[in-house]
Image (tube, helix red, strand yellow):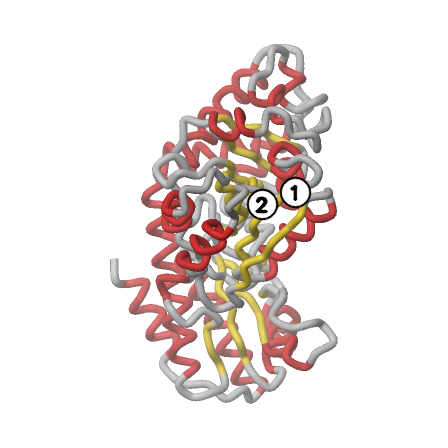
Amino acid sequence: MNLSQGRTYLAIPGPSVVPDRVLNAMHRASPNIYEGEIHEITATILTNLRRLANTTSHVAIYIVNGHGAWEAANANLFSRGDKALVVATGSFGHSWANAVRRMGVEVDILEFGKQRRADTEQIEHALRADKAHSIRAVLLTHVDTASTVRNDVAAVRAAIDAARHPALLAVDCIASLGCDPFFMDQWGVDVMVAASQKGLMVPPGLGFVWFSDKARAACAESDLRTPYWDWGPRAFADEYWQYFCGTAPTHHLYGLHESLKMVLDEEGLHNVWARHRQLAQAVWAAADAWASGGDIALNVPLADQRGASVTALRVGNGHGARLRKWCEVNAGVTLGIPLGMALPHEPAYADFLRIGHMGHVNAHMVLGVLSVMEAGMKALGVPHGTGALDEAAAAIAAT
């Protein structure tokens, strides 16, 4: 019997579940873009985006996805022939490296695999070796959405400073903003990128680039900058249209205004971080219990190196793909596909899946996903340990 009728659940690492309040805020007629409410909402959004990143720096909004936010940052950071040092702890570090390389920037990659955070001593060593200071920026993922490794941003900043290197620090927070703690100013971040479709609980379509005065001055002559990507007019607009280099993304702005209100003014950012961490711990507790009786393992062994927004899980012998399919077809729960753990044609690709627990998510949603996954294991005959749901419930109860 198929039990997937009813409301389905998208438990993937973006796009995340959009709250009804956000959908309702977006469900309206097009506004007057020349004056009035939309101008006031935009001003509030810009203030709240700074609050979200814990910064007094500048922020530019783009009508793009996360890859577009990378390109916006790249275009402002670099000139052709510049060098970037990319710290890779998963697929998205390499994707950012490929994006900036294709724009004419020389790229050095420090590879740290897919299961642990970056070693800051190696970063410091690489920067000390750059005697000519040819590296303009260090590019780092806070949480790599594919591997789910969470890097220590403040420690990377400290490594740059210890090397006495002038490189800027640019951080991808697409999978972490609004889920894991982030302090742009306190941690010494010069440029940060994010997007609307994960922790911010808004449909895909908006990308954001925050940048410091230091970054603005250092990149003033960057020759990759084009009129559309230029962060200057967007952050320091004289006229409303300049915030977006054209027509405003009006309905996304209505949704974002509502979601930022929910995060910052109602639940509170520190409470949002704590909720994500506790829900993640429930997922990890269940996974550890399953692992006690089967070929199942969390991709990142150390809990303090995992992001709180998404969990990568190995379910060996091809059971990862079979479990994903069963959950979607038979129970209405969609889990995330693996990215970068193996190539799609390789057998190991079928061993991995990802569980998204970011944004508008609560205890019953997470416990429901875990229950469906265990039902799927039973239905498919996947060997697994017992007590997973008890362990997850205990993690939820430990308030």
Tell me the crowding category of disc 2: few under 14, some 14 to 19, or many 20 or more residues within 10 angstroms, Cα based. Answer: many
Outermost residue, front side: 131
Location of residue 253 with respect to 69 vertically, above or below: above
Q: Amino acid at mark 1?
A: Asn
Q: Amino acid at mark 2?
A: Gln
What residue does disc 2 label?
197
What residue does disc 1 label?
65
Q: Nearer the viewer, residue 103 or 27?
A: 103
Location of residue 305 with respect to 253 vertically, above or below: below
Describe the element under mark 1 as helix, strand or loop.
loop
For marks 1 and 2, the one nearer the N-term is 1
Q: Given contact means CB atoms under 8 Å apart, are the residues at marks 1 and 2 in contact?
A: yes
Q: Position of residue 224 (x, y in %)?
A: 70, 33
Left or right? Give the position of 179 relative to 326. Answer: left
Q: Position of residue 16 (x, y in %)?
A: 56, 51
Location of residue 393 with respect to 265 vertically, above or below: below
User: Do we see residue 3 in this rendering?
Assistant: no
